[in-house]
Structures are given as structure tokens and as C-alpha cells.
Image (cartoon, helix red, strand yellow):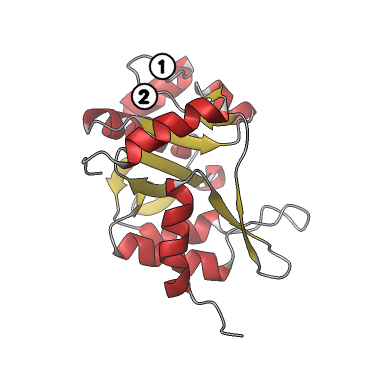
Amino acid sequence: MKRVTAEDLVPIILDGYRHGAFPMGDPEDGSLGFYTCDPRAVMPLEAGALRFSDSLRRRVRSGRFRITVDTHFRNVIECCARDRSAENRCWITPLLQKAYELLHREGYAHSVEASRDGKLVGGLYGVAIGGAFFGESMFSLPHEGGTDASKVCLVHLVERLRARGFILLDCQYANAHTRSLGAVEMPVETYTGVLERAVQMSVAF
């Protein structure tokens, strides 16, 4: 049986996103699966929909972090791919990481990065297809001065997507963290309709 390569995965992953399925790797055996969920979590892109605390507002305005886009993609995904603990291992397997790096090279995968004193202390990455952005993972390094760095990157991402005419920021599953920032859930039937419109749009990240 032919061994699946990262190059093989690129069109498969793109097709999955276009049809509402996202990839996740098994950290134990390296296998890859595609998943959907109902309801689906999205981050509204309407003005004022993103909620954040006064302290985060101050953090965004302070200029504490230098925010860049697509400058340190490999470093961002490497940080996102680290296991949180022995019990909480990361789904971004080496094969999947390589596939995302190829997607970045082809102009689909993008990162938003936060640096402080010349060091990367937070960031996020995802995949853009048409007017849809599929958020995948984020990280921050509070012990290195990166408190709230990933949240600040999210604020910049939302502003960028809104300015460029995107209509969908996919968050997959809702959790306390994304809900606190304004994520909402929608039935998969509604999500599918938005997704179909979004991936056919001609907008650029």
C-alpha cells in the first residue's frame, strides 16, 4: 500500500474544508481522520460581535506586541503542535504539520504572530478558502511575556478578515475560551449554507 505523503494530503484537506470537514491526527499512531460537528462554532465577523475584556482592550491598544502576518508560519505551527501534557497530546502530527506548511507555501494556510523584544510569544494559524477562514490552533507563552498574545492575534485576525470581506471564521467546537470572545454556535444546516457561499467568493487574505 502506498504511503500517504504530505503532498497527497494537500488536495484532500482542501476538499475536506470545502465540505465542512476538518482534519485531526492521532498523536499515538499518526493516523489522520476528518471530522464534523453539529452545532458548529463560528466567530461572527459583524462589527461589535467580538467581545473582550477591558484588560484585553488595553493590551491591544498598548502596542506591547509586534503583530505580523505570514512571517513566522513554521514557528507558529511548531509551537501549536507541542503537547500540552502527557495526557493532553496535540492532534497536529508531523505529517499534518508538513501538509499545513505546504498549504502555506501554496497560499492557503496563514498565520498571525505576536512578538515581544524580538521573540515570538504567541500566534495562531488557519486556512483561507474564498471568504472562509478555518481557524485551527493558537498558542501563547505567558512565562515569556506573551500573556494574552493569542487573543490579541485573534483581534487582529478578525479585523483583517472583516476588512477583506470574509463572511466566515470557523472555530469548529465551541469552548469556554472561544465563547468568552464572542463565538456562537449554529446548526450544521445553517453553517453549510454559509460555507457554500463563502468558499465561492473571490477575496484575498
What residue is rendered at 45% in x and 15% in y?
A: 54
Viewed as shown, does residue 158 lie left or right of 192? left
Badge 2: few (under 14), some or many (20 or more) residues near its Cα, within 10 Å?
many
Viewed as shown, does residue 143 lie left or right of 192? right
**In the rendering, which numbered label is found on residue 49?**
1
The relative height of residue 92 versus residue 168 in the rendered view (above or below) is below
Q: Quadrant of the N terminus?
A: bottom right
Judge by depth and name the residue closer to the eye, 119 or 193: 193
Q: CA distance from mark 2 to mark 1?
A: 7 Å
Amino acid beneath label 1 = Ala
Q: Quadrant of residue 63?
A: top left
- Could you say where residue 132 lies in the image, as x and y percent from the top left? 36, 39
- Label 2's element? loop
Viewed as shown, does residue 200 lie left or right of 29? left
Residue with the most extreme bottom position: 1
- Label 1's element? loop
The relative height of residue 141 versus residue 92 in the rendered view (above or below) is above
* Residue topped by disc 2: 45
Q: Do the residues bearing badges 2 and 1 touch, measured as CB atoms within 8 Å? A: yes
Q: Quadrant of the C terminus?
A: top left
- Could you say where residue 180 lies in the image, as x and y percent from the top left? 56, 22
Judge by depth and name the residue closer to the eye, 115 or 131: 131
Q: Quadrant of residue 56?
A: top left
What residue is rendered at 36% in x and 24% in y?
A: 45
Q: Would residue 172 be visible to someone looking at this image?
A: yes
Judge by depth and name the residue closer to the eye, 80 or 63: 80
**In the rendering, which numbered label is found on residue 201?**
none
Residue with the most extreme right position: 87
What residue is rendered at 21% in x and 41% in y?
A: 202
What residue is rendered at 34% in x and 18% in y?
A: 46
- Could you say where residue 16 lies in the image, as x and y percent from the top left? 48, 53
Amino acid beneath label 2 = Leu
